[in-house]
Image: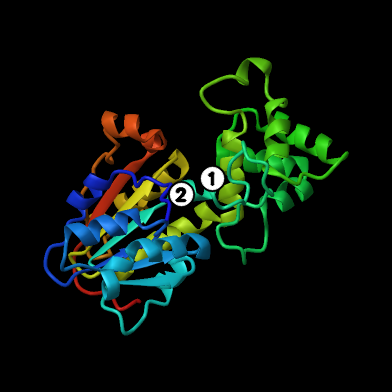
Amino acid sequence: MKIVHTSVLLDECLKILKPAGSDNLFVDGTLGEGGHTEAFLKTYPHLNAVGIDADAAIQKKAKERLSPFGERVKFYLGWSDDFFKNYPEDLQRPDIILLDLGISMFHYTESGRGFSFSADEPLDMRLNSSSKISAADIVNTYSEKALADLIFNYGEERYSRKIAAKIVLRREEVRFQTAKDLADCIYYAVPQNCRHGKLHPATKTFQALRIAVNEELNRLPSLLELAFSALEPGGKLGVISFHSLEDRIVKLYFRELGKNCTCPDNVPICKCGGRARAVVLTKKGIEPSEEEIKNNPPSRSARLRAVQKIGCKESSK
C-alpha cells in the first residue's frame, strides 16, 4: 500500500491533545489515510479510536494501514456531522476529537476526480460520490454572476469576474469535461503578468469549487457544535484549518466557547449563567515549523486550534 499524504502538525497534535487517562476514546473526524490516528494509537497504547470519512476509497486505504491495531479502531463511512448528530448510544463519549479540514494528497494524486488542475481527469471534486452536484455541474450551469460570486466568496479570487466571464464564454462552444479544460481556461482569463506566480492561476477557483461541491463551509459551524457537544467533560477538540475562511469560523466559535458570558450585547442582565463552556488551549493557533514546511510544503497554510471542554455533561448527543 502506497501512502501519499503526510499528516500535518503531527507532533503538535500529539502534545496538545494528549489523553488525560487510560481507556480514552479518540475520534478522528476526517480520517483520510489514517496518519493522525496511527500516530495516536502508536503513542498512546491504551487509546481506542473511531475513524470517520465520507470517501469509501480512501477509507479502504486507512483500514489497511490501521489493521495492525485490530479492535482498537473502528470505522464509520459518512460525514462527520451526521456521525456526531446521531452519536451511537453504545459508544463511549470521546475524550479527544480531531478534525483536519484539509484535502488529502490522495484526492489530488489518486482519486481521479479532478481535484488537481494539472490532471486530465473528470471535473468532479466530490468527496462522497453520492453527493448530488459535481464541479462540472457548477461551471456548466451556473450564471456568470453566480460563478463570479462563488469564486470570490469561497476562493477569495481577485479576478473572479474575469474568470467567470471566460468560463461562460468557453462553455458556449463546448461544455467543460475535465479539470485540465477548466484550468487552461482560467490560465488565459487572468492578466498575463499573473500567470507565472507561485500559485497556478486556477488554484483559488479550484478551492472555491471544491468547497461548494462538498458544502465545506456550510457544514463546518454545525460540525463544530455537534463535535463539541459529543465530547466528555474534560475532553479536547482540535481543528486543523488550511485557509482563512474556515480558520475564521473555528477561531470565532472557540472564542465563544471560552467566554464567561455569551448573552447578546443588548441583554442588560446575564441569563446564560456566566459560565464558559471550554478553555481555549491555543490563543493564536499553532502553525507548522520551518522544518515541517520545508519537508512538507502543503503544510505551510495549516493552523491548529484546540479547546478543552469544562462543565457538566450535556444532554444532547
The residue beneath circle 2 is 104
- Looking at the picture, does residue 202 appear above or below residue 62? above
The residue beneath circle 1 is 108
In x, y percent, where is residue 152? 61, 37
Disc number at residue 30?
none
Residue 123 in sight here: yes
Using residue 283 as the reference point, say whether residue 162 is left or right of it.
right
In x, y percent, where is residue 222? 44, 62
Instruction: Name the quadrant of the N terminus.
Output: bottom left
Instruction: Name the quadrant of the C terminus.
Output: bottom left
Depth check: 301 or 258 in front? 301
As drawn, the residue found furthest toward the front would be: 1
- Looking at the picture, does residue 16 appear above or below residue 222? above
Using residue 6 as the reference point, say whether residue 286 is left or right of it.
left
Q: Are marks 1 and 2 in contact (CB under 8 Å)?
A: yes
Q: Which secondary structure lies at badge 2? A: loop
Residue type pointed to by label 1: Tyr
User: Image quarter for residue 278?
Assistant: bottom left
Give neighbour class at mark 2: few <14, some 14-19, many 20+ (Cα, 10 Å): some
Residue type pointed to by label 2: Ser
